[in-house]
Amino acid sequence: TAKRGDSAEGSTGRKRQKAPAPKEKYDSETFVAPYAGVKIEIPHTPTGVKFIAKLAAEFDKHRDTNAAKKQSMYTKDKFFYFGIKAPEMRKITKDVLNECPRLEDEDVASAVAKAFEHRERELHLAAIDILVKRPLSIDLPTAKIFITTASWWDSVDMLAINVVGPIVRQNREEGSAVMRTWLSHPHLWLRRASVLHQLHYKEATDLPLLLHSCKAVMMEKDFFSRKAVGWALRHHSRTDPESVRAFCAEHEEQLSTLSLKEATRLLPPSKP
């Protein structure tokens, strides 16, 4: 029973500190996306789970604590690392793949989901690297989950360009409609993914969609949004320089210095 003089703030007058909210946990059967309170389940398969377990064990044998600290600092301490460099990571992953049963489509999605249950970034990237080679093994809702989980440019860009891109290209009408909804989504990395998904389309680029996506985010202050706009326009300038030139001229006042510099870097001199 509270004593006289006690309040909700406690007898000392200091506000009680709320206990930190428990972190989202994942059960052993499914992967649950901890985004926006929506729980979308991706079934784990025995083959996918065993592959990630074996890969994690092999990565752990090559752990380099000093290198891991430097890698973590580079990502502003967003992730833990084993401290393994990319070439070695790919070699170990290839060796484990050769030792394990073939991953079917459902196993690939399961492997990525299971990898995200681990804190070390190399597992996330290794699993996504496998998905990149099998992009049509998942759909856009699943890609959305992966983009919005443990998000950073390294995983998001791989997924946007090499997974979302091929999925949208399979069904341009439906896929492009989804990309337009991502542009107004509150999640920064979904907006970036939408801007970048056509990066490898070249002549098949949907120009109205590309320019619409750039207009949608070009006034954002975030570095990653501004960089995405410049990168997408610069890449398309190799295929259609005049459209990029015209867009930059029309929106010179709205485009950030970074976006404009990136977009015009490869443009040939204007014709007299």
Image: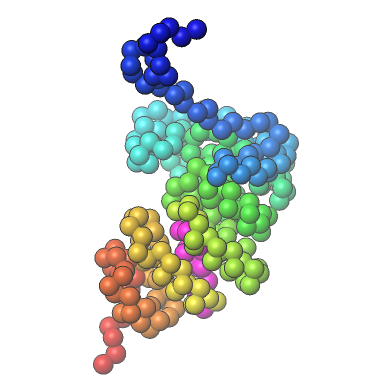
Report the magenta residues as a range. 191-203
- The percent coordinates of residue 3 (x first, y second) are 43, 7
Horizontally, residue 258 falls left or right of residue 142, namely left
Does residue 16 sit above or below 217 in this rendering?
A: above
Q: Is residue 100 visible?
A: no
Does the magenta segment cover residue 206? no
Does residue 171 sit above or below 101 in this rendering? below
262 relative position to 187: left or right: left
What colour scheme governs how the chains and residues are painted in the rendered image of this protein? rainbow
Please tell me whether residue 197 belongs to the stretch shown in magenta: yes
What is the chief secondary structure element of the magenta stretch? Answer: helix
What residue is at 61 percent from the left and 44 percent from the top? Answer: 38
Whether residue 117 appears in this view of the structure is yes
| Nearer-the-camera pick, 137 or 94 | 137
Q: Residue at x 40, y 12 (%)?
A: 6
Residue 56 x, y percent position in the rendering: 57, 32
Q: Is residue 172 left or right of residue 192?
A: right
Q: Is residue 169 left or right of residue 79?
A: right
Residue found at the very far bottom of the displayed protein: 272
Q: Position of residue 241 (x, y in %)?
A: 38, 80
Residue 249 spot, x, y in % from top left:
31, 79
Number of marks: 0
Tell me what residue is drawn at x 27 percent, y 83 percent.
269
Question: Residue 76's quadrant in the figure?
Answer: top left
Relative vertical location of residue 5 with respect to residue 218 in this rendering, above or below: above
Q: Is residue 31 above or below residue 202?
A: above
In what quadrant of the picture does the C terminus appear? Answer: bottom left
Nearer-the-camera pick, 5 or 11:
5
> What residue is rendered at 40% in x and 81% in y?
243
